[in-house]
Amino acid sequence: MDRAEILKQAEELITGNRQIMYGSPDESFEAIGYMWGVYLREVYPEITKVFAINQITAKDVAVMMALLKIVRAARDKRVYSEDSDYPDTYIDLAGYAALAGEIATKSGPHAVKATPPENRPVNVSPF
């Protein structure tokens, strides 16, 4: 699989049915960031001294998901070859990078202007 095929498949994933199934990445990632913040505050109460509950932004979620894919790629024990059936990690990584870039630059048809973390109320759920 060449780079153009990886990027094409990533594009199909992030602009296709997932948008219909889960809503916009901005909204979905913002909800995920909120829940991660809730979880971290519950597990690590001392974090409340420095970390608002909804300080993990949609861009943070996209970047951290890309980091997850990078770790998976680094630790993957499968043997890759030209006809490998395992390009999914790299396709997902390209997709998360594109979503992070779109969110960070506030461009594209699905981008929404997020509230900066310092202006968000501390205990408001996006649900």
Image (spheres, rainbow, N blue to C red):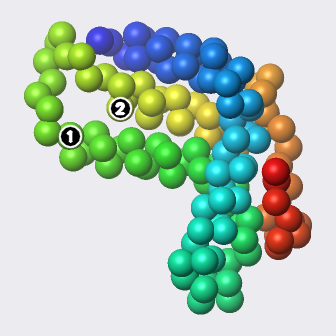
Q: Residue at x 40, y 10 (%)?
A: 5
Residue 121: x, y in percent? 88, 69
Q: Secondary structure at mark 1?
A: loop
Q: Nearer the viewer, residue 4 or 53?
A: 53
Examine the rendered structure and indicate whether residue 118 appears above or below residue 25.
Answer: below
Q: In which image quadrant can residue 90 be found?
A: top left
Residue 69: x, y in percent? 39, 42
Residue placed under numbered mark 2 in the picture: 89
Residue 123: x, y in percent? 83, 71
Residue placed under numbered mark 1 in the picture: 76
- Mark 1 nearby-residue class (10 Å; few <14, some 14–19, many ≥20): few
Q: Secondary structure at mark 2?
A: helix
State the mark number for residue 101.
none
Q: Nearer the viewer, residue 2 or 22?
A: 22
Tell me if label 2 and label 1 are in contact, CB under 8 Å: yes
Examine the rendered structure and indicate whether residue 95 appears above or below residue 58.
Answer: above
Amino acid at pointer 1: Asp
Residue 29: x, y in percent? 67, 45
Amino acid at pointer 2: Thr
Q: Residue at x 68, y 88 (%)?
A: 49
Examine the rendered structure and indicate whether residue 75 appears above or below residue 109.
Answer: below
Q: Residue at x 15, y 24 (%)?
A: 80
**Picture mark count:** 2
Marks 2/1: CA–CA distance:
9 Å
